[in-house]
Image (cartoon, rainbow, N blue to C red):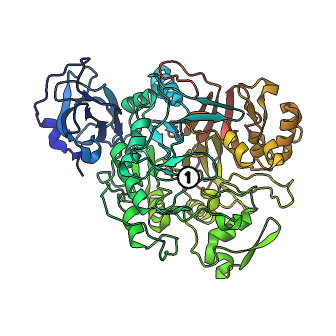
């Protein structure tokens, strides 16, 4: 498609004529979404920008320069590029033939010699190099809910870090945008406010070009995109943020997606509101335009293949689901065309230290584990209270339940309901092809660490609702995640265990809170064993889990009590303090006492460590990011929690509420992983650490 350009090794010796650089002068040409780089390879990198002519919508010819020094005295590569309306004036420049393990500087130059800001990027180490790796992890950024202060905090932290602790790359685990435009109000429990950008305008994505369409959700006035230009408009709004621009310019990023890049809670090309094949193609196209990623040109992974594929436009119609395969993948032609218009699951190699396996948990998956029909409506995605995991297990198994003899009815909330998945295939998160790719790469990898980058957490989040009439010690609530696909989780963990694969770690986000724990091979088996550790990071600015959960449990005072309490009673910096940390780590009674007394010491007296024994850390009202520092013998993680992002700190130093660090020592084949040395710097974690 227009605006996509590939260079070759000959680029390094070629000469092109560019206008003389006139840094700092005004120009009719602008780079309103900044510049970026992505997916470091040992010999290549992808560079990106968007350039516009403020006086015309015509195609713009620009130059790219890559240098080994920031002053551009030693220019290594130059390339002429064109940015046209077909790609919304974005350009992607794949530069190969580079030296391994090197930092480079780059910029783009307009026809009149105006230079973009200077960017910095790097290549990966040579395949046989023994080199450490430092990663910063981000996810879930809602432009209208808060400022992107987490990026500013990260840049400042990295600038002050010793050289051995400086970041090599950043990973964004999905929900880079939120497709629901709703007017720019930040809502915390008990307060509302409107955010403003430095130019005085409201921090809102504004009116969509098409006007959008109502979301149909029971609450709120959310407007959803209808057209390609609607999605482009949202990305342009997000990428106007100065803190995000600064981070993207100075560090190479690696991206995957989750649901909000297309539509909340979608799967394949379906949604509770209907079939969305057209929206899926639009979402894929605009992600490809604005999220630089090396796809078709990716190096084969340890399994010997590269499944990633650049976007290729296809005409589709919105069509009802047809036949599904045994892993719940739709065989309907429009759906197949939409999801195959681009493929993003791929791998990156970091010398002999790490293979980074990036998965797509949206395009090939089945519907959420809880069939919403048992709730009486297709639009309510969550039950009034967490439910028995056995119910999820039966629905996830579909027609294969009970050795291919699924029950016709199930017990839910004390009543008998029809089994809505009695004739359905077994639910899958990855689909058969991607799952096999993952297994092949895990077993073929010779790297010390195998980093599984997930858009959704794999560990179980069990709510202790044993105090309810139909409660359970490990009630399941978030069934759009791996908790809704327990059979495939068990299969993958069983595969890792049976093949004696060590040093596999899941890195993820999505949960709008910080968590760390262990993924077991089967949480419902008394003989369950630890298989891989998992680190899940808080959102950049999407509404925190505490606030969201207080809304979801609004009709049940006992559930709300165990979720949060009046933070002013303990001098907390916000109205509501989390009891849910204690709920996850130490059970419902511990959370109840904490909520009723606001006294941590009293709550500690009734701790039940048998609740979610695999969970080690919870920070339910966090915003921020986390970092991992990886050597051959250890992975050190640090979770950074910043205050509510309701004040623009893009030119200042955001405060840090707390930092929680921990170690994951490497472990030999046949052993079980452990999370050790958990340390808190700061205060008010409210029983969120289990040693």
Furthest residue to the front? 211
Left or right of residue 34: residue 136: right
Above or below 140: residue 483:
below
| Residue displayed at 65% across by 25% down | 657
Give the percent coordinates (x, y) of residue 667.
Answer: 59, 47
**Residue under circle 1?**
502
Query: Based on the displayed image, in which of its 4 quarters is residue 574 positioned?
Result: top right
Q: Residue at x 33, y 51 (%)?
A: 295
Residue sitting nearer the eye, 322 or 98? 322
Residue 469 x/y as whole percent: 87, 59
Quick one: label 1, few (<14), some, or many (20+) residues within 10 Å?
many
Is residue 298 in view from this perspective? Answer: yes
Q: With 17 as the anchor, is 138 left or right in this view?
A: right
**Helix, strand or loop under label 1:** loop
Relative depth, front residue between 488 and 380: 380
The structure residue drawn at horizontal position 51% and vertical position 52%, both measured from the top left corner, is: 259
Residue 638 in sight in this render = no
């Amino acid at each position: 498609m227009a605006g996509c350009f590939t260079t070759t090794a000959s680029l390094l010796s070629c000469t092109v004529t560019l206008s003389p650089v006139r840094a700092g002068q005004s120009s009719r040409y602008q780079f309103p979404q900044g510049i970026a780089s992505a997916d470091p390879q040992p010999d290549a990198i992808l560079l990106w920008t968007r350039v516009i002519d403020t006086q015309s919508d015509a195609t713009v010819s620009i130059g790219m320069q890559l240098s080994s020094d920031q002053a551009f005295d030693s220019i290594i590569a130059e390339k002429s590029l064109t940015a046209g309306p077909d790609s919304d004036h974005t350009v992607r420049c794949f530069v190969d033939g580079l030296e391994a393990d090197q930092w480079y500087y780059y910029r783009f130059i307009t026809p009149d010699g105006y230079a973009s800001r200077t960017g910095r990027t790097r290549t990966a180490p040579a395949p046989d190099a023994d080199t450490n790796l430092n990663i910063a992890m981000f996810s879930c950024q809602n432009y209208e809910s808060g400022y992107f202060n987490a990026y500013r905090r990260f840049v400042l932290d990295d600038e002050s870090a010793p050289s051995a602790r400086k970041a090599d790359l950043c990973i964004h685990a999905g929900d880079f945008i939120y497709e629901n435009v709703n007017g720019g109000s930040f809502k915390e429990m008990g307060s509302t406010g409107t955010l403003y950008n430095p130019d005085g305008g409201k921090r809102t994505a504004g009116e969509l070009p098409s006007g959008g369409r109502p979301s149909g959700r029971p609450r709120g006035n959310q407007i959803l995109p209808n057209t390609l230009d609607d999605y482009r408009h949202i990305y342009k709004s997000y990428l106007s943020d100065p803190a995000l621009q600064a981070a993207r310019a100075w560090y190479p990023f690696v991206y995957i997606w989750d649901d909000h890049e297309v539509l909340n809670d979608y799967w394949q090309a379906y949604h509770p509101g209907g079939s969305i094949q057209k929206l899926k193609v639009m979402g894929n196209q605009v992600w490809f335009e604005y999220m630089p990623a090396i796809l078709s040109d990716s190096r084969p992974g340890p399994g010997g293949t590269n499944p990633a594929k650049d976007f290729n436009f296809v005409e589709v119609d919105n069509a009802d689901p047809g036949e599904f395969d045994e892993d719940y993948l739709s065989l309907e032609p429009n759906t197949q065309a939409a999801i195959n218009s681009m493929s993003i699951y791929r791998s990156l190699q970091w010398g002999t230290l790490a293979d980074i396996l990036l998965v797509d948990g949206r395009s090939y998956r089945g519907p959420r584990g809880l069939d919403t029909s048992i709730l009486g409506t297709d639009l309510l995605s969550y039950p009034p209270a967490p439910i028995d995991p056995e119910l999820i297990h039966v629905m996830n198994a579909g027609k294969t339940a009970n050795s291919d003899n699924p029950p016709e009815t199930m017990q839910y909330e004390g009543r008998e309901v029809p089994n809505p998945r009695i004739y359905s295939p077994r639910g899958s998160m990855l689909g058969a092809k991607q799952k096999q790719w993952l297994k092949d790469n895990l077993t073929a990898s010779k790297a010390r660490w195998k980093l599984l980058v997930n858009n959704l957490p794999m560990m179980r989040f069990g709510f202790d609702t044993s105090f309810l009439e139909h409660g359970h010690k490990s009630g399941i609530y978030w069934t759009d995640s791996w908790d809704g696909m327990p059979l495939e989780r068990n299969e993958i963990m069983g595969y890792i265990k049976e093949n004696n694969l060590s040093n596999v770690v899941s890195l993820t986000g999505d949960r709008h809170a910080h968590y760390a724990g262990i993924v077991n091979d089967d949480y419902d088996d008394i003989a369950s064993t630890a298989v891989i550790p998992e680190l899940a990071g808080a959102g950049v600015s999407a509404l925190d889990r505490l606030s969201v959960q207080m809304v979801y449990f609004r009709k049940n005072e006992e559930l709300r009590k165990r979720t949060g309490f009046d933070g002013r009673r303990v001098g907390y910096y916000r109205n509501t303090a989390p009891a849910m940390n204690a709920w996850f780590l130490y059970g419902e009674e511990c959370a109840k006492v904490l909520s009723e007394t606001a006294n941590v010491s009293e709550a500690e007296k009734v701790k039940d460590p048998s609740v979610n024994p695999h969970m080690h850390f919870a920070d339910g009202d966090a915003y921020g990011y986390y970092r991992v520092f990886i050597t051959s013998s250890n992975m050190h993680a640090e979770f950074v929690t910043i205050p509510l992002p309701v004040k623009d700190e893009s030119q200042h130093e955001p405060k840090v509420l707390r930092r929680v660090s921990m170690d994951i020592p490497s472990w030999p084949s046949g052993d079980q992983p452990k999370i050790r040395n958990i340390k808190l710097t700061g205060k008010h974690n409210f029983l969120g650490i289990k040693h």
